Image (cartoon, grey):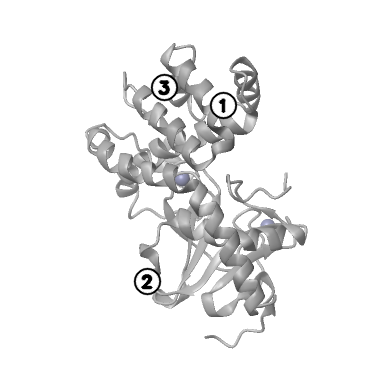
């Protein structure tokens, strides 16, 4: 490993055990809905692949992501009700505490008082207050409606990303947000191979793009590797990029081997959520808010 002066947190056995316990519980809870997501995306990607992609290279060069260029998230007339009901079941399975609320959401979908496709058709033109209004109309908590729409949207965004990713494959993109959907990064991977390039993983559609290793993806201020990375558990490459200008951090897999790429990014992100706790306790905010990285950060 490069002889960089590193800040270290504790890397002892107790930390490892605490870490093991915390992420195992979170993975168990999210496992049904994450498995459903994987299974469904594979089966619906073929449908989407027939769609026509709108891509204006000039406005893309100005930083406008593909989804903001008139590429709708769902196909015309696409029915998402069956899929929505599977999502509410999977969330209820992983989070028994939400079972009753997921049943309320399911009933609203069946009675068509809730039409998830209308939400997807408008994406990303929606506001958070709409969730609060909807939650109150369905007698469910904000958290329940957020979780439901989060995973519903993720499925279609990941599908879109798989199709649109090939369109922009050779295009340069130096922004700290996603070229496909405009989402913030949830994870960075510094690859052992490829001269230690940093790749950012989108928190919304999982698209990955290369980004300068010492520039902050949130505020673009340039720092130094020696002062912008904190190494939590060196053996496992667990670290975080942090920026003292905007007080944001990005969980980072530092110098991971290519084979580690086969682990789904969501799982990496959940496993590393103990770093979120550490960084948020130090007063930093995550670059992207995820269902598993909110520990009092606003
Ligand atoms: Zn994205
Ligand atoms: Zn910054």
Residue holding disc 2: 258
Circle 2 residues within 10 Å: few <14, some 14–19, many ≥20: few
Q: Residue at x 35, y 63 (%)?
A: 262
Circle 1 residues within 10 Å: few <14, some 14–19, many ≥20: many
270 or 51, nearer to the observer: 270
Nearest to N terminus: mark 1 or mark 3? 1
Q: Which mark is residue 49?
A: none
Task: Mark 2 and mark 1 in contact? Answer it, CB < 8 Å.
Answer: no
Nearer the observer: mark 2 or 1; the answer is 1
Quarter of the rendering containing residue 191: bottom left
Q: Secondary structure at mark 1?
A: helix
238 or 271, nearer to the observer: 271
Give residue 210's position: percent from left, percent from top.
Answer: 45, 61
Q: Residue at x 30, y 49 (%)?
A: 166
Ligand 2 resides in the quarter of the picture at bottom right
**Visible in this render: residue 176?**
no
- Would you say 166 lies left or right of 135 here? left
Q: Secondary structure at mark 2?
A: helix
- Would you say 21 lies left or right of 113 here? right
Give residue 174's position: percent from left, percent from top.
Answer: 50, 56
Q: Secondary structure at mark 3?
A: helix
Give residue 239's position: percent from left, percent from top.
Answer: 60, 70
Q: For the view shown, which residue lies furthest in the bottom direction?
A: 3
Give the total of numbered labels.
3
- Would you say 123 lies left or right of 5 here? left
Nearest to N terminus: mark 3 or mark 2? 3
Residue holding disc 3: 117
User: Is 133 above or below relative to 185?
Assistant: above
Nearest to N terminus: mark 2 or mark 1? 1
Residue holding disc 1: 101
Mark 3–mark 2 distance (CA, rounded to whole Å): 38 Å
């Amino acid at each position: 490993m490069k002889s960089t002066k590193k800040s270290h947190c504790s890397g002892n056995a107790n930390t490892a055990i605490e870490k093991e316990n915390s992420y195992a519980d979170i993975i168990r809870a999210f496992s049904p809905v994450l498995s459903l997501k994987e299974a469904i995306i594979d089966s619906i990607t073929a449908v989407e692949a027939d769609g026509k992609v709108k891509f204006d290279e000039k406005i893309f060069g100005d930083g406008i992501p593909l989804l903001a260029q008139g590429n709708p998230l769902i196909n015309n007339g696409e029915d998402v009700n069956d899929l929505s009901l599977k999502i509410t079941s999977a969330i209820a399975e992983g989070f028994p505490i939400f079972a009753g609320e997921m049943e309320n959401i399911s009933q609203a979908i069946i009675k068509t008082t809730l039409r998830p496709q209308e939400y997807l058709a408008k994406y990303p033109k929606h506001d958070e207050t709409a969730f609060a209004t909807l939650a109150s109309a369905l007698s469910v908590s904000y958290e329940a409606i957020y979780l439901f729409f989060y995973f519903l949207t993720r499925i279609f965004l990941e599908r879109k990303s798989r199709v649109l990713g090939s369109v922009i494959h050779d295009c340069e993109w130096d922004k700290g947000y996603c070229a496909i959907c405009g989402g913030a990064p949830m994870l960075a991977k510094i690859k052992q191979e490829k001269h230690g390039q940093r790749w950012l993983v989108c928190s919304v559609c999982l698209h990955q793009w290369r980004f300068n290793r010492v520039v902050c993806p949130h505020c673009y201020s340039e720092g130094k590797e020696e002062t912008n990375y904190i190494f939590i558990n060196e053996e496992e490459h667990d670290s975080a990029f942090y920026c003292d200008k905007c007080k944001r951090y990005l969980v980072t897999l530092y110098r991971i081997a290519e084979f580690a790429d086969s682990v789904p990014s969501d799982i990496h992100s959940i496993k590393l959520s103990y770093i979120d706790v550490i960084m948020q306790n130090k007063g930093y905010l995550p670059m992207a808010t995820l269902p598993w990285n909110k520990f009092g950060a606003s």
